[in-house]
Amino acid sequence: MPPDDAALIADWTALCAALENGDSLSCGPLACGLLAAVALGLSGDSRGFARDFGIAHALVLREVNILSGDLGLLTVTRNDERTQRSFLALSLAGKDLTDRLTRA
């Protein structure tokens, strides 16, 4: 594994842990992993995240709905009706949260 990949995986793992252990986010590990992946540029869409992490796409879509709806941490920039893929970006609140945790 190239060093850049190892560093990116370490960053993702650290951000996931910070999101799970923080007081500002009350969701499970899948949502934390998805939010961290979008924040670090590892995944830009729901189907890609599901494929890369070996998770059912329906489960990822459920987390997208929570993170983009009630919590307002993700923004769905586009949907593909045929594949049900949601293309994702951090909202301002999501960026603020992940930036704060990566600086800590």
Image (cartoon, grey):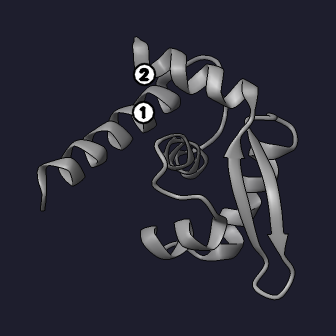
x and y, in percent, of residue 22 in the image = 53, 20
Q: Earlier in the sequence, mark 1 or mark 2?
A: 1
Residue at 87% x, 81% y: name it.
81
**Dot 1 lies on which element?**
helix
Q: What amino acid does circle 2 point to? A: Thr
Residue at 48% x, 19% y: name it.
101
Query: Toward the viewer: 39 or 35?
Result: 39
> In the rendered image, which residue does mark 1 sit on?
15
x and y, in percent, of residue 37 in the image = 49, 49
Q: Residues within 10 Å of mark 2 (few under 14, many from 20)?
A: few
- Left or right? Give the position of 93 relative to 48: right
Please tell me whether residue 58 is drawn above or below residue 6 in the rendered image: below
> In the rendered image, which residue does mark 2 sit on?
102
Q: What amino acid does circle 1 point to? A: Leu
Instruction: Residue 91: name its quadrant.
Output: top right
Name of the residue lying farthest toward the bottom: 82
The total number of labels drawn is: 2
Residue at 67% x, 30% y: name it.
94
Query: Toward the viewer: 41 or 21?
Result: 41
x and y, in percent, of residue 40 in the image = 46, 42
x and y, in percent, of residue 61 in the image = 73, 65
Instruction: Residue 15: name its quadrant.
Output: top left
